[in-house]
Structure formats: structure tokens, C-alpha cells
């Protein structure tokens, strides 16, 4: 049972290795693995002048220039023999890593070349796998292969083990390595770039730091991954070394801080330390490549590993205590990616095979990035659901409040109707009591006196009837229509004026509708004119009278003083009544009760009444302010659609 479990474990390990592409690099038994070569070095000194070539020595591949020669540039020649195979068939070579620049020679003849010697600022083939086809040997003797590299400090130059075999054996190895190293790197760069850009777009809309950390981290990871895609760099060295390295060194703390933000630990000392590391990452990259202090990069990797391990502990402990699904998924993803990163750091520090290894973190990053994207999507989905629930709650509350307001408004409308009806009853009661009631009371006292003339009783009765008719007309008239109210007065009093021998001249111009006027205002104006005509018929002894009504524009009404709420510069409706009677003393302190009532009614209308009288002429002038909404254009439009009441209207018969 134990052996079966052990065999099963090895099979699972082999499957995992096959998935991440490592099995394709493992040479089959029929292939030749070259892991030792004769090495000849030519190193430049601190003054950049070439020193004498070192004696030939045996070197073990892979050979990492930065580990062996530290702060020096130079060249290295690797010489080895390829065992004889089929003399008539070509031999193929697969080299996983080779650079920065190189020359490949077979039996003293140059087979391939890349870049300049020393490497140019844009030449860097140290990340791309290489495939070479050697010509047929033509004999049973081994073939001598010389690979010369030109390397620069901190540029990760060197040579990995070489695999030799037939084309049918080597080409699949090269294609698989090309797929995982180049196509896989391109895929990672695209996925990280797209996820980072989407996250930054969300951050620009919502301004939550969690999306900023993730977006910047993914974009920076995309930049550092893109380095493996170029053999001719888009930037000159050393900037093409600084930018990807700074991006990698800043991406790790940013994504660690994102993980802390997801679990609610964004304001801890660890989170602030990670933020400081993200800011200092470009400085470390400059020191490690441009100075170059090669010890800075291993130190920085160690600090990043320690910070990532601390983050992993915090996130995993939080995930264990949390019931939130994304916290648990994030905890598992963080543990896996940190363990992969720890494995890579350990191999780089301790293993001689570090130069030829494929970093696990590069392959594990795809799953980690997708996991983080899922965490963000799940967070956004929950936020959207919470927002929808909040909107539904607000809509329900708003509908409830609208219903309550509608009920309040309905009660208010009913109350307004009730108050309006009550006020109308009170007005009608007051008008009947003060007007018609006074008339009838006076008529009753007059009728009770001995010797009262029938003519006097008839006059008082006519006044009472006319006042009653005007009251009824006001109740059925058009609110705010001054011309109609005037026409009603003429219609009711015209026959009496004619019977009293008074010739009335009527001149009413187009007048605006008085906004805000009600039946009460129309009745006030009718009663004011009624009392004026009644006094004229009873006391003036006039034979001619005229009534003129017109609209005075604001430019002509500058000198007119109007009491009440009229605003400066408002138009004014002027109603002027004149007669040629005997006149009276207009300077008296309103001894007449009728004149006092007329002034009171003018004040109630918000207007002003002026009275001038002398023998042969009495003139009453009523000025009413027009609300600001009324304009001359409105008056003209009204005149074009409805005729002016020059003749008497036909009020309801009473």
C-alpha cells in the first residue's frame, strides 16, 4: 500500500511538471546532455580594458556570468564535443538560455551569430531559447562546438546546459520551451495588462485603494514579464534592465498590500511597510543595475520574501477565521504563490542550476492573477447586490413617503377647499350684511318715517337690487378679468344712469388678466365703482360721465405711487371715472362714508385711489399694479384671441 501511494505521488508530480512545461526540457535517454565544457574567459577590468585571456578550465553548465564575475564585463568561450551519430544526418542543438550576445561555431566554422561584441545597448538574447542545426559530420569523428558569449554586468548573461540529438528529437524540445518561455510570457503579460487596466478603470470611478493596488501591481507585473519577449530591447541598456526590475520589485509589495486590503488589514504596520517598499523599488533597481551593487538585488528579494511570508500569515489566519468565501480563496492563492516565490529565491541563492531554471512564480502567477481578478469580481458583485438592495429599500421608502405626502397633500387640498368655501361664505355674508343689509335697514327706517316720499324708497330699492346683482355677477365672473368686471358694472347701472339723465362714455382698452385675482378682488372693484356711480347719481347732478380703463407701461407709470406689494418698474392698470357735476370738497377728511369705503376697497386691491373734485368736474383715478408675469406681449396676444368688452356683457340674470 505504501509503495502504491509512493508511485501515485511520483505520477502526480510528473503530471504537474508536465503541466508547467518542465518535462519537455528533461532530455530523453537517447539525447546528449552537455553540462561540462572547456571555458576560456576574457574579462574587462574596472577601466573597461580587456585583460589577457585566462587559462582554459573545465566549467559546469549552467554558467551564470553575474554569479562568477560579479562587476565585470567580458567574453567567455565554451568548447565541447558532440558524440558521433549518423554521419549523413544533421545534428540539432537546443540551448534554453544563451546571451547576452553569442557566436556559435562548429569545427572552426561560424554557424550562427547574434548581437555585437561587446553587446550593444539593445542586444539581449539571454532569455530566449535557441535552436541550431549542425551540418552532417560526414565522418564518425565527434564535432567540436564553440559557443562564445559576450556578457555585461547585471544583464543575466551566461550559458545553460546544451541538449544535442536529431532534429526530430530536439525540435519538440525547442518548440515546447518557446511556447512556455515566449508564448507563455506573452500570455501572462497580456492577461496582467488587461486585468490591471480594468482594475484602474474601476478605481478611477470608485476611488477605492484596493483597485489601485491590484491595477498597479498587475500592470507592473506585465512590464517585468515583457522583458523575456524581446531580443532587441525597446530601451537601451541599462534602462531596459532598470524598468523591468523596478516593475517586478514594486509589483510584489503592491499585490501583498492588495491582499491585506481584501481581508481588512490595510492600515497595519505591515501594510505601511509594503507601501514604502513599493516606493523604494525603483531606487533599489537603479542601485542594483546602474551602479552596480549586485548585492542589492538578492537583499531585496530576501526582504520581499520576508514581507510576503508575513502577509501570507496574516491573510491565512484571517481566512481561517472568516466565513467569507473570497477570503478563503485568497488565502489559498496567497499560500501557493508565496511558496512558489520562496522556492525560486531559495534555488537562486543555493543551486548551481539557478541560471537554467524556469521560475515557478512566473507560471503560478496566471492562476494567482485569475484568482485575484475573481476576488475583485466577487467583491464588485456583492457591492452591486448591496447597492441594488439599498436602491430597492430607498425606492420602497420613497414610495411610502410619497404616499404619505400624497395623503397629506390630499388633506391639504380638502382643507383648502373647505377654507375657500368658508372664506367665500364669510365674504358673501359680510357683503350682504354690510352692503345689501345696510341698504335694506336704511330703507326700512326710511319707510317707517311719516311722510316718506315713494321716490326715495324706490331709489334705495334700486340701489339694493343693483348691489345684489353685482354680488351675483362677481360670483360667476372670470377671475382676474378686469374688463369683464367693468362691463358687468356698466350692464347693471347703465339703465339707471340713463334714467338719471347721465350720458355715459365708455372707453376700455385691452387689459391683461390679473394673475392671482379671485372673485373677492373682482367684487371689491365692482363695489368701488358702484359706490362711485351711486354717489354720482345721488349727489353730483351731472349730465355727462366717462369711464376709461387702460394699461400704463412701466415707462409711463414711473411717477405713479401704488401701495401694497407692487414691485418697482411694474405695469399699472388705470381706471378713471369723470363727471361734470357740481363737485365736492375732496380735501375733507373723508367725511363721506362712501368715499371712505372706496379708499378701503382700493387698498384691499393693492392699489391706490385718487380723487380730485371742483365745480364742473370730479375725477376718480384707480391704479392697480399688474403682476410681473404680465407683459405687453401677453396683452396683445390676449387681444388677438379674445375681443375687448366694449359693449356690455350679458351676466347671469337676477
Image: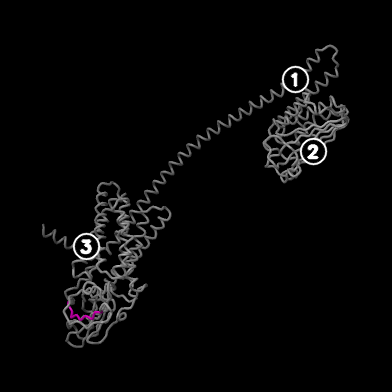
Q: Which residue in the protein does label 2 denote? A: 508
Q: Which residue in the protein does label 3 denote? A: 343
Regarding mark 3 in the picture, which secondary structure is present there? Answer: helix
Label 3, label 1: how far apart the Cα atoms are: 113 Å
Q: Residues within 10 Å of mark 1 (few under 14, many from 20)?
A: some
Choose between 93 and 233: the one closer to the eye.
233
Mark earlier in primary sequence (3, 1): 3
Q: Position of residue 266 (x, y in %)?
A: 32, 51
Label 3, label 2: how far apart the Cα atoms are: 104 Å
Mark earlier in primary sequence (1, 2): 1
Q: Is residue 402 left or right of residue 121?
A: right
The disc at residue 438 is 1
Q: Position of residue 548 (x, y in %)?
A: 81, 37
The residue shown at (61%, 28%) is 419
Say if 146 sits above or below 411 in the image. below
The residue shown at (70%, 41%) is 570
**Which portion, as a residue range, is magenta?**
36-44
Residue furthest top in the image? 450
Regarding mark 1 in the picture, which secondary structure is present there? Answer: helix
Mark earlier in primary sequence (3, 2): 3
Q: Position of residue 203 (x, y in %)?
A: 40, 55
Q: Are marks 3 and 2 in contact (CB under 8 Å)?
A: no
Image colouring: one colour
The residue shown at (29%, 78%) is 101
Choose between 15 and 479: the one closer to the eye.
479
Identify the image quadrant of residue 117.
bottom left
The residue shown at (41%, 57%) is 201
Q: Residues within 10 Å of mark 3 (few under 14, many from 20)?
A: some
Amino acid at each position: 500500500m505504501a509503495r502504491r501511494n509512493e508511485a501515485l505521488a511520483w505520477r502526480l508530480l510528473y503530471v504537474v511538471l508536465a503541466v508547467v512545461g518542465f518535462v519537455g526540457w528533461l532530455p530523453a535517454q537517447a539525447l546528449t546532455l552537455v553540462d561540462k565544457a572547456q571555458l576560456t574567459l576574457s574579462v574587462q577590468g574596472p577601466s573597461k580594458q580587456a585583460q589577457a585571456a585566462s587559462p582554459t578550465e573545465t566549467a559546469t553548465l549552467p554558467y551564470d556570468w553575474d554569479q562568477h564575475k560579479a562587476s565585470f564585463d567580458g567574453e567567455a568561450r565554451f568548447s565541447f564535443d558532440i558524440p558521433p551519430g549518423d554521419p549523413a544526418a544533421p545534428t540539432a542543438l537546443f540551448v534554453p538560455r544563451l546571451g547576452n550576445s553569442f557566436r556559435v561555431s562548429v569545427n572552426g566554422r561560424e554557424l550562427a551569430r547574434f548581437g555585437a561584441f561587446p553587446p550593444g545597448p539593445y542586444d539581449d538574447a539571454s532569455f530566449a531559447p535557441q535552436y541550431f542545426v549542425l551540418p552532417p559530420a560526414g565522418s564518425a569523428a565527434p564535432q567540436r562546438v564553440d559557443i562564445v558569449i559576450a556578457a555585461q554586468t547585471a544583464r543575466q548573461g551566461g550559458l545553460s546546459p546544451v541538449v544535442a540529438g536529431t532534429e526530430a528529437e530536439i525540435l519538440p524540445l525547442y518548440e515546447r520551451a518557446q511556447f512556455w518561455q515566449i508564448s507563455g510570457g506573452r500570455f501572462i503579460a497580456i492577461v496582467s495588462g488587461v486585468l490591471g487596466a480594468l482594475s484602474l478603470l474601476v478605481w478611477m470611478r470608485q476611488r477605492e485603494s484596493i483597485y489601485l493596488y491590484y491595477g498597479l501591481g498587475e500592470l507592473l507585473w506585465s512590464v517585468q514579464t515583457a522583458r523575456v519577449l524581446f531580443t532587441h530591447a525597446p530601451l537601451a541598456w541599462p534602462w531596459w534592465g532598470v524598468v523591468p526590475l523596478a516593475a517586478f520589485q514594486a509589483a510584489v509589495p503592491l499585490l501583498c498590500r492588495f491582499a491585506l486590503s481584501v481581508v481588512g488589514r490595510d492600515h497595519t504596520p505591515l501594510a505601511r511597510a509594503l507601501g514604502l517598499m513599493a516606493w523604494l523599488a525603483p531606487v533599489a533597481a537603479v542601485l542594483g543595475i546602474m551602479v552596480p551593487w549586485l548585492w542589492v538585488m538578492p537583499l531585496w528579494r530576501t526582504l520581499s520574501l520576508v514581507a510576503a511570508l508575513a502577509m501570507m500569515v496574516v491573510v491565512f489566519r484571517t481566512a481561517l477565521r472568516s466565513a467569507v468565501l473570497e477570503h478563503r480563496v485568497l488565502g489559498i492563492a496567497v499560500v501557493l504563490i508565496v511558496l512558489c516565490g520562496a522556492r525560486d529565491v531559495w534555488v537562486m541563492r543555493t543551486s548551481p542550476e539557478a541560471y537554467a531554471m524556469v521560475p515557478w512564480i512566473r507560471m503560478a502567477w496566471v492562476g494567482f492573477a485569475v484568482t485575484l481578478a475573481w476576488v475583485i469580481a466577487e467583491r464588485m458583485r456583492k457591492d452591486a447586490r448591496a447597492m441594488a438592495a439599498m436602491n430597492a429599500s430607498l425606492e420602497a421608502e420613497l414610495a411610502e413617503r410619497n404616499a404619505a405626502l400624497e395623503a397629506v397633500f390630499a388633506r391639504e387640498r380638502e382643507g383648502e377647499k373647505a377654507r375657500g368655501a368658508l372664506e367665500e361664505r364669510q365674504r358673501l355674508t359680510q357683503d350682504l350684511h354690510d352692503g345689501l343689509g345696510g341698504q335694506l335697514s336704511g330703507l326700512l327706517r326710511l319707510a317707517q318715517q311719516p311722510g316718506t316720499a315713494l321716490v326715495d324708497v324706490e331709489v334705495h330699492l334700486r340701489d339694493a337690487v343693483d348691489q345684489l346683482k353685482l354680488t351675483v355677477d362677481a360670483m360667476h365672473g372670470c377671475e382676474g378679468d378686469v374688463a369683464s368686471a367693468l362691463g358687468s358694472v356698466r350692464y347693471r347701472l347703465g339703465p339707471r344712469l340713463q334714467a338719471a339723465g347721465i350720458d355715459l362714455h365708455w372707453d376700455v382698452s385691452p387689459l391683461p388678466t390679473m394673475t392671482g385675482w379671485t372673485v373677492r378682488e373682482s367684487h371689491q372693484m365692482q363695489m368701488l365703482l358702484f359706490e362711485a356711480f351711486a354717489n354720482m347719481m345721488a349727489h353730483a347732478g351731472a349730465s355727462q360721465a366717462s369711464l376709461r380703463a387702460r394699461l400704463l407701461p412701466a415707462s409711463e407709470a414711473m411717477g405713479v405711487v401704488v401701495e401694497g406689494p407692487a414691485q418697482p418698474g411694474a405695469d399699472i392698470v388705470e381706471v378713471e371715472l369723470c363727471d361734470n357735476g357740481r363737485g365736492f370738497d375732496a380735501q375733507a377728511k373723508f367725511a363721506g362714508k362712501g368715499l371712505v369705503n372706496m379708499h378701503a376697497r382700493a387698498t384691499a386691491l393693492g392699489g391706490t385711489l385718487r380723487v380730485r373734485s371742483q365745480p364742473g368736474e370730479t375725477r376718480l383715478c384707480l391704479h392697480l399694479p399688474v403682476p410681473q408675469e404680465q407683459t405687453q406681449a401677453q396683452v396683445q396676444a390676449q387681444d388677438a384671441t379674445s375681443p375687448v368688452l366694449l359693449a356690455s356683457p350679458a351676466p347671469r340674470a337676477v
